[in-house]
Image (cartoon, rainbow, N blue to C red):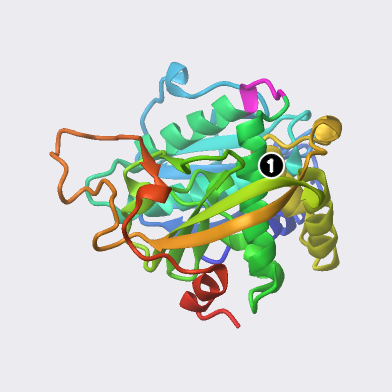
Amino acid sequence: MSGWTEDGLARAWRALTRREADEDWRFVHLTEIGTVSVEAGCHFPLGREALIVAFPGSWPVNPARLPEGKGFDVSCIEGQTVFAGKTAIALVRRPEGSPDIFAIMAVDVLRTLETAADAANRDVMDAFIERVMEWQAFMARSHRPLSSDAQIGLLGELWLLRLLTDTSLGAGALDCWQGPLRAAQDFHVRGGAIEVKSTVRTGSFLARINSIEQLDCDRAPNFLCAFRFEESTDGISLVGLVSELRKRFGLAGVQRGFEALLMVMGYLHEHAALYGRTLSLKDARAFRAEGDMPRLTRAVLPAAIRSAAYVLDLDALEVPSIGISELINEFELD
């Protein structure tokens, strides 16, 4: 799966749209992930895009175990010779489902399969079903306007995204934005990671760390980036920053991917009028998540603690910080 993108999947699906005779399905092989076979498919008569994950062995799957929700259907494929001797589970976009979000979901599910296949103690099918259930839950949730905190959080992530597009990454910075895809950190830059925390509050900068892995991972270097914003009439609004990035990614031909990630984050055009508050950056710091940096780590936690979230007072940290330009230099981005 390595190297596949949403655009790559979209091209595969477009190649399958021409129906022959009365066929119900058309398939094209994408890749193998360990013992799992992955196909792109098109389901007729509506010509709906599909991702098919075929597990070795043939056994009945309890339909009640397959997740249900909005945006896409999940079902077993039977009677297709290409899947003989295998258990094939299809994710099929519903007519009302967003094609862009479906493509992003498909890539994310496949990356989850890769990770599970590399973990000796992880059942690949369980990992697959679990991830699909998470996406079904996302598709089913009601899309209300972003809260004030969510707006500031998204503004901070987009602020860093804009900074990264100004480097040698260019529009490729969009691929680094992994927070919408439920990665532990907001950005994966080359082999490293950056988690972004933002605030407009005065007083102590209290950052909520949502998991143990957020500041304790195998990626290096791993940074916690802190943005403090303040209201300013000559600042920029969330709507303004989104508009600016739309233009950048539009010129690079990747605006559809950007729009889909915004939707996953809960940013919808219908709510844009609510996001006109203008802010400017007052302070920006980055802390290296290593050594004496206060944080929870797997190495010192009892094995019985499976997950944890905590609040970190960034103003109380007694470890050195660096500026944003130095942060960019850490990743050797020109």
In the figure, is residue 165 to the left or right of 302? right
User: At x 28% / y 43%, what residue is drawn?
Assistant: 122
43 shown above or below 314: above
Label 1 SS? helix
Camera sees residue 25: no
- List x then y, in percent, for residue 193: 45, 61
Viewer-closest of 266 and 38: 266
User: At x 20% / y 34%, what residue is drawn?
Assistant: 305
In the rendered image, the residue lying farthest to the front is 203
For the image, the number of numbered tags is 1
The amino acid beneath tag 1 is Ile
> In the rendered structure, does residue 257 fall within the stretch colored magenta?
no
In the figure, is residue 77 to the left or right of 265? left
Viewer-closest of 143 and 308: 308
Q: Dot 1 surroundings within 10 Å: few (below 14), some, or many (20 or more)?
A: many
Image: magenta residue range: 139-144
Q: Quadrant of residue 147?
A: top right
Q: Which residue is mark 1?
A: 101
- List x then y, in percent, for residue 253: 81, 64
198 shown above or below 22: below
Magenta stretch secondary structure, dominant: loop
